[in-house]
Amino acid sequence: MKSIDALLTGLVDYAGLFPPASEDMRPALENYAAYLRGSDRKALGRFIVPISRLQELEESGSDLMPRGPKSRSWHLSVLISEDVRAARGEILKFNRRHSSASSKGGARGRVVIDVAELKASTVGEIDHQCADLPPGITAYFEIPSGGDVSSLVKALARVSARAKIRTGGVTPEAFPPAHTIIDFMSACRRETVPFKATAGLHHPVRGEYRLTYESNSKKWMMYGFLNVFIGAVLLYAGESDDTALSELEEADPSAFSFEEEEIQWRDKRIAAEQIRAARAEFAISFGSCSFREPIDELARLTRRAKSTIQ
């Protein structure tokens, strides 16, 4: 369906190295390589890796990396938590080693770092870190929810950076209140700042789910990635914060229906072209330690919705 394709294309950045999956490097890279060959590869975004583990990635995954003039390069997003200036040098060296324009790069595997993810809680931190990044790198800054989001998003707009919001985790306190997510997305919309989300979005629709993969894991109310991204599309299309908040808090899967040219939430019809535009310019992706879980659950939801209609 065009509407589902518009929603899913490049939506999931694979973060298999991180909790709750916490895969070792080799299995995580094997998964990523397999997903890129699979039938749902259009939904796959970047491989997320801490910059401190780049050498491990090269050593563990050299034989998995794409080679040959017609091969599609892997795209990496690196997490930078310390010295950005030192990270700049690491990024430049890595990209030179794996450049598709270089014969040696092709032999080593075609891989490119084109995104960096950082954290900032002040305007000054945004300015200083951006100044130290290499040219051509798209920067996402995770900013604290509940703080002066408006000022921080304005600072991101000024330096052409992007925003990142943490939407959950493996503990209850990692999940922000719904209104803070809407405040964040609304601020990004006002300033024309694209954003990504991370953590806690394994499931399409809001509900109580286990926090980890442990059998005795506590359950908690989690946001659905469908809620977050359809809410973002509604804001992008000019709907009110209150409408987006109601959609974000929607916990009834039957409130969503899926057609070839549109997705409907209650009385709101969202055309595939609206979804595609918002995804391209505004609501970019989310990081997930599982790729299959969100994709497979959405597939089951759309099949149930279709069978109910029929």
Image (cartoon, grey):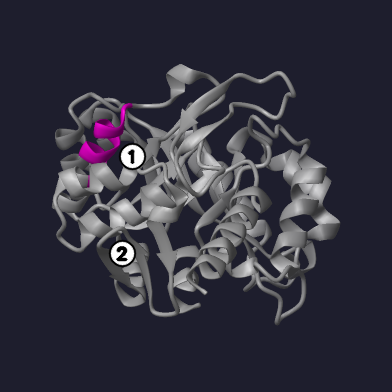
Residue span colored magenta: 177-185
* Residue identified by numbered label 2: 278
> Between 120 and 163, which is closer to the camera in this rendering?
163
Measuring 67% from the left and 41% from the top, which residue is drawn there?
Answer: 16
Describe residue 93's horizontal placement relative to residue 80 as left or right. Answer: right
Q: Indicate the position of residue 223 as horizontal and vertical percent values.
A: 43, 38
Residue 43, located in which quarter of the rendered image?
Answer: bottom right
Q: Amino acid at mark 2?
A: Ala
Q: Indicate the position of residue 199 as horizontal and vertical percent values.
A: 51, 36
Q: Which mark is residue 249?
A: 1
In the image, is residue 301 part of the stretch drawn in magenta? Answer: no
Q: Secondary structure at mark 2?
A: helix
Q: Secondary structure at mark 1?
A: loop
Describe residue 20's horizontal placement relative to residue 107 as left or right. Answer: left
For label 2, count other residues whose C-alpha is less than 10 Å away and answer few (under 14), some (14-19) or many (20+).
many
Foreground tag (1 vs 2) = 1
Describe residue 29's horizontal placement relative to residue 83 as left or right. Answer: right
Describe residue 95's horizontal placement relative to residue 256 as left or right. Answer: right
Helix, strand or loop: magenta stretch? helix
